[in-house]
Amino acid sequence: MRLALRLIYVVALVLIVLGLQGCEVDNAADEETSILTTTYSTTTTIEPTTPQLNYSLEERTIKLDLGSAEIRKYKWEFKEKVYTMKLAFYSGSYDIYKGRTRARNYDLFASDPYDDIYIKEIARQLSELGTSLDDWDIPPLAISFIQSLPYTSDLITTGFDEYPRFPFETLYDDGGDCEDTSILAAAILEEMGYGVVLVELPGHMAVGVECDKSVEGSRYEFQGKDYCYLETTSEGWALGQIPDEFKGVSAEILSVQARPYLETDFNASYSYDSTDTYVGINATLQNLGTEAAKCLRIYAGLEASEPGKVWDQIMGDNFTFPSETTARIKVKNLHAPSGQPFRIIVRAIGDNIVSEPAYSDWITWTFGSPQ
C-alpha cells in the first residue's frame, strides 16, 4: 500500500508555500487549507516517482538600432501658432519592433520601456515649446502634435483588422488609427508627468487626462480620480470635448502603468497502466508585460473533479522573470488514479502577478485508452 491521493485546496497551498519563501502574498486570497488522503493498492508496472519540475529562461534583449538616422521634421498649428519638432529615426529599430507580438493588452503598448528614448525626447521638446502656455494647455498641445499625424487604417497598412502599434511604430509609420494615436498620446503625457488612462469605447479609443473640476467637458471617474476625455484622431478637439456619438456611452478605463503580463501554453504526454496515469507537461510561459514578475513560481497540477482539489501537484522555486523573456518548463511524473477524471492546470504565481490558469480538457484514462 502507498499514499496515492492528496486532495488539497490549490490556492491555499500555493499561498502558504509562497509565504514560506518570504514572498509577498495577497491576504484577501488566503483560505483555510483542507487535506484529504486515501490509499489504493498498486501492482503498477510504472515505478512510482516524485513529480519533477525544471525550467530554462530565454531572455530577449531589445536594443534599438541607433546607426544611421533619418531626420524628420514635424509642423503643426495650435491656437493659431505654428510649432515644429525634429526627431531622428532608425530603420533597424523598426525591424526589431515588427518582430514583437501583438498579443498583449493596449496599456502595455503605452507603458513599453524600449522606446523611452523617443518618448523622453518628444516630452522634452513639447515642454520647451509650451513654456508660455497655461498648465491645462500642455496636454492639448501634445495632442495637437499627435492629431496632426495622418489617420491610417490597420487593414490597409498591415492587412490585419486590428494591429496595435507601439509608440515608436506610430511615429515611424507617420500615423495610425485611434488606438495607435491614443497609445502614443498616453505614453507622451505620462512621461510629461500627467496622470493618464486609455478610454476604450465601442469601436473607438481615446485618452483620459487627470483633471480637476475647473476643466469643463466630458470626464470619467476612475479609482477616485477624474479623467477628462481627450480625442487623438483628428485636429481641433479640446480637452473634455467628446464626439456626439460617444456622449453617455459606457467606456472601459485602462490604467497605464508598468506591470508583468504572462501568457501560458502547454502540451502533455501520458503513460498509464491499470492503476496509475502519469502525466508529463511541456509548457511555455512568456512575460509580455513591461515589468519583471517578481518572486515567480511555476505551479502544475492535476485537478480532481471535486472543485478546488487536485490529485497531484508541484511548484518550482521562485525566480525573477524579466519582461520579454520566455520560460521553457518541463514537468514529469504527475499522477492520478486510473479511471478517475482530471484536467491539467498550469499557472504562475508571484508577488506582483498571478497568471490566468491554463487548462487542458477533462480526461479519464482507463487501461487501454483515454475517455
Image (spheres, rainbow, N blue to C red):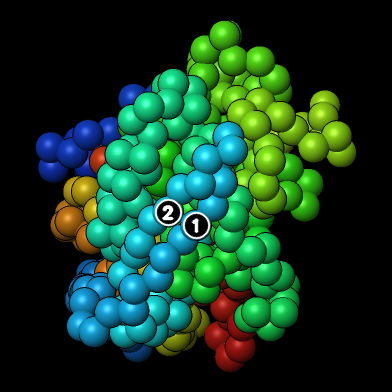
Q: Position of residue 283 (x, y in %)?
A: 38, 75
Question: 21 left or right of 272?
Answer: left
> Residue at point 35% right, 83% down?
91
Circle 1 residue: 75
Question: 368 left or right of 273?
Answer: right
- SS state under label 2: strand
> Residue at point 39% right, 79% down?
94
Q: Quadrant of residue 5?
A: bottom left
- The vertical placement of 187 against 90, above or below, is above
Q: Position of residue 53 (x, y in %)?
A: 24, 70
**Residue with the most extreme right position:** 245
Count all numbered tags in the image, as a single digit: 2
- SS state under label 1: strand
Circle 2 residue: 84
| Mark 2 Cα shell of 10 Å, populated few (<14), some (14-19), many (≥20) | few
Q: Is residue 132 visible?
A: yes
- The vertical placement of 192 against 132, above or below, is below
